Image (cartoon, grey):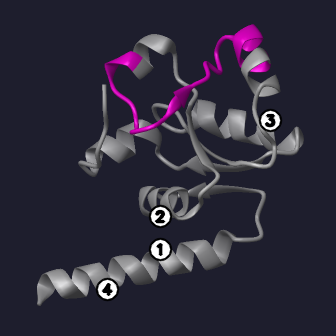
């Protein structure tokens, strides 16, 4: 019974997240909303904007690495992204991804930022890959 209630609450929360942010071009999302929206969108791309060595140590499943702290690499990577897709961006704590997401928004991308970053994600024991 508790599991059923929990699942119902998760579905309700995911629906609320989708409704509240469906018209936004940029938003900071909790780990639950971030995960729900990324799974719900067929055109979603998850971007990890940490350093390559941080990415190699562990990252969200399916994430692509685009190093925010390497301006030339970030710029080159940004030019290769499809603006018709929706991007879900994260870093270690949220500072770099917030800056990257704002930059991407200015460039015309649809982007969502993971509030609390990888630290919050792993604190919640959510899945990662190496």
* Residues at marks 1 and 2 touching, judged by CB atoms closer than 8 Å: yes
* Kind of element beneath mark 1: helix
Compare marks 3 and 4 and give the one earlier in the sequence.
4
Compare marks 1 and 2 and give the one earlier in the sequence.
1
Q: CA distance from mark 4 to mark 1?
A: 10 Å
Residue on which the image places disc 4: 8
Residue on which the image places disc 3: 103
Badge 4, how many Cα within 10 Å: few under 14, some, many 20+?
A: few
Residue on which the image places disc 2: 36
* Kind of element beneath mark 2: helix
Range of magenta residues:
56-75
Compare marks 4 and 1 and give the one earlier in the sequence.
4
* Kind of element beneath mark 4: helix
Point out residue 73 in the picture as x, y percentages from the top left corner.
Answer: 71, 12
Which of the 4 image quadrants contains residue 4?
Answer: bottom left
Image quadrant holding the N terminus, namely: bottom left
98 in the magenta segment: no
């Amino acid at each position: 019974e508790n599991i059923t209630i929990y699942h119902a609450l998760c579905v309700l929360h995911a629906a609320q997240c989708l409704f509240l942010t469906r018209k936004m071009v940029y938003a900071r999302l909790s780990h639950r909303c971030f995960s729900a929206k990324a799974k719900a969108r067929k055109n979603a791309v998850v971007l990890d904007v940490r350093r390559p060595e941080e990415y190699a140590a562990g990252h969200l499943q399916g994430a692509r690495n685009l190093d925010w702290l390497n301006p030339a690499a970030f710029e080159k990577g940004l030019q290769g992204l499809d603006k018709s897709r929706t991007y879900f961006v994260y870093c270690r704590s949220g500072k770099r991804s917030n800056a990257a997401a704002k930059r991407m928004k200015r460039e015309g991308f649809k982007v969502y930022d993971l509030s609390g970053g990888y630290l919050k994600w792993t604190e919640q024991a959510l899945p990662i890959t190496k």
